[in-house]
Image (tube, helix red, strand yellow):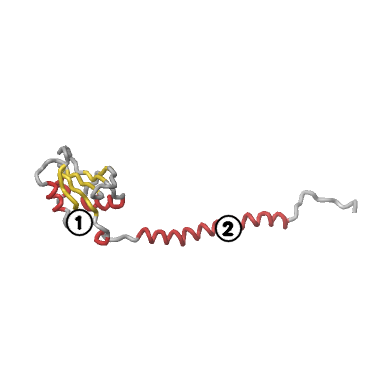
Amino acid sequence: MLNEQLDLTTKPLAKKWSSKAWLIIIIIALALALILYFTVFRKAEDKVENTSYGEDQLPAIKVVILNGCGYDQLAMDFATALKDKNIDVISMGNTPKPIYDKSIIVMRKGDKHDLERLQKMTGIERWTSALNEYHSADFDIIVGRDYEQFTK
């Protein structure tokens, strides 16, 4: 027994495998969880996001139309041009000073989705935000001197 050589350089294979086995099992479980998430749950989210409604199925956007350039009856003419759109004109009027060369949408209490809808329906891309929860409409449309390109 004393003459037996001890080999200290080799380690038992079973111990080496068992310590790495847990690491491999954890990596495989994480990979499967990621695959499951991207194949099952993401597809369900995409279906919800891709469900789009036609403009006729969405509620009308409430707006106040303001004549911003001083031309006679411009707010009324612009409201008439929007009559076939999904826009509910709450009121019409004039801005205190007729200084607007370009038409603009003022977001009062609407959201970005409704803003995008309104931009698409009117063709007016310029917008600003002046939030006021007590305002009578979601948006103001200030009609400027460039009104003709939006009334065609």
Q: Is residue 97 left or right of residue 58?
A: left
The image position of residue 100, as x and y in percent, is 17, 39
Q: Nearer the viewer, residue 63 or 100?
A: 63
Quadrant for the N terminus in the image = bottom right
For label 1, count other residues whose C-alpha is less than 10 Å away and answer few (under 14), some (14-19) or many (20+). some
Q: Nearer the viewer, residue 55 or 66?
A: 66
The image position of residue 141, as x and y in percent, is 20, 46
The image position of residue 147, as x and y in percent, is 15, 45
The image position of residue 5, as x and y in percent, is 85, 51
Q: Residue at x 25, y 44 (%)?
A: 127
Q: Residue at x 87, y 52 (%)?
A: 4
- In this rendering, the count of numbered labels is 2
Q: Secondary structure at mark 1?
A: loop
Instruction: Please identify the residue farthest to the right as the structure is shown.
Output: 2
Mark nearer the N terminus (2 vs 1): 2
Q: Residue at x 48, y 59 (%)?
A: 37
Name which residue type carries label 1.
Answer: Lys
Which of labels 2 and 1 is toward the front? 1
The span from disc 2 to disc 1 (Cα, nearest Å) is 55 Å
Q: Quadrant of residue 55?
A: bottom left
Q: Is residue 152 above or below residue 97?
A: below
Contact between marks 2 and 1 (CB within 8 A): the answer is no
Residue 28 marker: 2
Identify the residue position indicated by label 1 in the image.
85
Instruction: Please identify the residue farthest to the left as the structure is shown.
Output: 72
Q: Secondary structure at mark 2?
A: helix
